Image: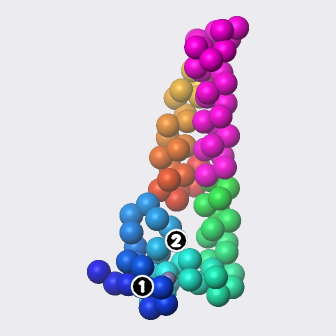
Amino acid sequence: MNHCLTCKVQLDQPGLVETADCGGDCLECMGRAGDPAAAEAFLKETKALRAALQMADELCKYALPKFNWGASALDARAIQLLNETPRAISQALKGEKV
Ligand SMILES: [Zn+2]
């Protein structure tokens, strides 16, 4: 296994985009050094994570009736959220585009 030349973290750890190998240094160290491509990668991940969290937040509001007695458990939005949110969370955690 290769390690970052700067911070010594193990490179290319699954699910941890900040450990991506950028020619010997990890993505986090590249970002801290002001590398624009690293900043873009973190921005992309932040957007994917925010999108997944927004869906998860909606899922909690609309699809968990024990916390919202007035809402129908089987309305269309709840069914959509139950189908789409788990995938969005998984993709966000893997650093993929939602
Ligand atoms: Zn590093």
As for residue 52 lying within the magenta part, the answer is: yes
Q: Is residue 71 magenta?
A: yes
The overriding secondary structure of the stretch rendered in magenta is: helix
* The disc label shown at residue 8, or none: 1
Rounded to the nearest whole Å, what is the CA distance between mark 2 and mark 1? 13 Å
Residue hosting label 2:
18
- At 44% across and 91% down in the image, what residue appears? 5
Is 91 above or below relative to 23?
A: above
Contact between marks 2 and 1 (CB within 8 A): the answer is: no
> What's the image's color scheme?
rainbow
* Above/below status of 90 relative to 7: above
Query: At 67% across and 24% down in the image, what residue appears?
Result: 61
Q: Could you tell me which secondary element the residue under label 2 belongs to? A: helix
Secondary structure under tag 1 reads loop
Indicate the position of residue 70 as horizontal and vertical percent values.
Answer: 70, 8
Ligand 1 within 8 Å, label 1 CB: yes
Residue range (magenta): 49-76
Is 80 rendered above or below residue 53? Answer: above
Q: Is residue 76 visible?
A: no
Callout 2 amino acid: Glu
The image shows residue 8 at horizontal and vertical percentages of 42, 85
Q: Amino acid at mark 1?
A: Lys
Q: Please, is residue 5 above or below residue 74 in the view?
A: below
Query: Depth-wise, is mark 2 or mark 1 nearer the camera?
Result: 1
